[in-house]
């Protein structure tokens, strides 16, 4: 195993094809994981897992706002390896905090579930950070290795347990998932014997301050983003039960094949956008975002239309008859993901210019309206109310981004109007 990993590490590290292949593995692995868990756990238990996963996503939003998003935008102006050491030290402190919370929960609650959720947060965030670090350094090869390790262990572990011991339970699934993330992290660390460089407290404080200044609006936006979209899922779980959340999560997993392209954008576009802006200015940045939007937009549209057309057959064949009555959710989520795609280049533009207040404002408006109308809407319209709320949140976000870009006279025309 160690020889295989070292051989991979001698291959060329850069190249967009390797990056796209890595995103395909990550999204394909998540898709297969969702299918396996949904089929094995059933609607109710899978819904409970989905509710727990909302907590992981909340932690991910804060983590990205404080550490990974600033790193991907600020690294271009630093051009020093010492900066990445300081960011890694920040990451280590965050992980130590999660582990301490998990130990405390295990000691005081005497229950397995909550400590497992916290450990999942820690392992998931650490693996996500390592992937982002690989993309910042354009080391797509290393990112590919740790993702292959992750999803091989995930799917192999779950299928092996089912083969030898019978149907999966929620607790066993969580243990295997946490173990797979830890294995992926170990694979990243295994072949390297570089000396660990611990930054001084003064240097670390400077980096923390820089990230906080960059993230002053993004941190609030991360909290509000979670509420703007996920609060409708919380309302769905409270009013309709975890079974409804399981059905919604099933639809999201199917349409989530688009995450191949979304993750590719998130991991590669901000770094390249920051480089172009630092070297050539706004005009070159906008042209780059226009080109990315048009090219990837065609792929996203093709994929969403194909998934919607195949949804009745796909759900019954993959998930089973228990899920078939919810095939209409695929069409709603396809439209939702088309709107989500449009917000990506807008946010990249704002983040590259370190103008993050519009992001905060959009999430503030969306979250405020969501918290006001979510429970009444779900009580009145049921599942349709959840879908209307999710779509409405994205429309609010797009409207605010568009108004800001058009009203700011000091900027050139938005990327979609560039010639």
Image (cartoon, rainbow, N blue to C red):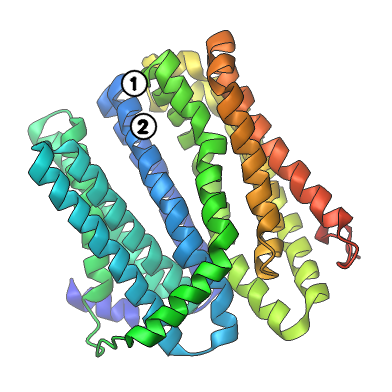
Which residue is labeled 1 in the image?
43
Instruction: Give how far across and how far down residue 122 sits, in percent.
Output: 28, 56
Can residue 351 be seen here? The reply is yes
What residue is shown at x 31% (from left), y 63% (from top)?
94
Residue nearest the viewer, comparing 169 with 95:
95
The residue under label 2 is 51
Secondary structure at numbered mark 1: helix
Quick one: 57 or 366, which is closer to the camera?
Answer: 366
Measure the alpha-carbon separation of dots 2 and 1: 12 Å
85 to 61, vertically: above or below: below
Q: Earlier in the sequence, mark 2 or mark 1?
A: 1
Q: Is residue 320 above or below residue 146?
A: above
State the residue in front, 408 or 331. 408
Classify residue 141 by image quadrant: bottom left
Question: Which image quarter is the C terminus in?
Answer: bottom right
Residue at screen point 41% across, 19% down: 238
Q: Quadrant of residue 150?
A: bottom left
Q: Position of residue 45 (x, y in %)?
A: 28, 25
Mark 2 vs mark 1: give the one in front: 2
């Amino acid at each position: 195993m160690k020889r295989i990993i070292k051989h991979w590490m001698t291959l060329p590290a850069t190249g967009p094809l390797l990056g796209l292949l890595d995103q395909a593995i990550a999204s394909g692995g998540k898709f297969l994981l969702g299918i396996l868990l949904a089929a094995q756990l059933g609607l109710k238990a899978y819904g409970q897992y989905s509710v727990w996963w909302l907590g992981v996503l909340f932690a991910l939003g804060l983590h990205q706002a404080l550490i990974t998003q600033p790193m991907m935008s600020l690294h271009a102006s630093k051009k020093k390896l010492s900066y990445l050491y300081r960011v890694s030290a920040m990451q280590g402190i965050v992980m130590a905090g999660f582990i301490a919370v998990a130990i405390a929960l295990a000691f005081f609650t005497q229950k397995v579930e909550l400590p497992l959720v916290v450990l999942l947060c820690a392992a998931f965030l650490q693996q996500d950070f390592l992937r982002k670090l690989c993309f910042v350094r354009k080391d797509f090869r290393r990112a590919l290795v740790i993702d292959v390790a992750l999803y091989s262990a995930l799917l192999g572990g779950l299928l092996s347990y089912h083969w030898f011991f019978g149907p999966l339970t929620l607790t066993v699934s969580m243990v295997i998932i946490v173990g797979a993330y830890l294995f992926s992290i170990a694979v990243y660390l295994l072949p390297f014997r570089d000396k660990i460089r611990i930054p001084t407290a003064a240097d670390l404080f400077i980096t923390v301050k820089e990230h906080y200044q960059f993230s002053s609006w993004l941190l609030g936006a991360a909290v509000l983003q979670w509420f703007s979209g996920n609060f409708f899922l919380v309302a769905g779980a409270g009013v309709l039960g975890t079974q409804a959340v399981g059905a919604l999560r099933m639809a999201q997993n199917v349409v989530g094949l688009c995450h191949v392209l979304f993750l590719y954008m998130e991991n590669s576009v901000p770094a390249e956008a920051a480089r172009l802006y630092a070297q050539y200015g706004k005009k070159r940045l906008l042209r780059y975002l226009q080109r990315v939007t048009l090219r990837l937009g065609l792929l996203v549209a093709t994929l969403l239309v194909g998934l919607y057309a195949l949804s009745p057959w796909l759900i019954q064949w993959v998930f089973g008859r228990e899920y078939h009555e919810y095939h209409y959710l695929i069409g709603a989520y396809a439209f939702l993901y088309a709107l989500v795609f449009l917000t990506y280049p807008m946010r990249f533009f704002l983040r590259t210019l370190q103008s993050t207040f519009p992001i905060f404002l959009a999430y503030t408006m969306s979250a405020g309206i969501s918290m006001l109308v979510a429970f009444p809407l779900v009580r009145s319209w049921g599942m349709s109310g959840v879908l209307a709320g999710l779509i409405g949140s994205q429309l609010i976000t797009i409207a605010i981004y568009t108004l800001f870009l058009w009203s700011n006279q000091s900027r050139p025309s938005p990327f979609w109007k560039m010639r």
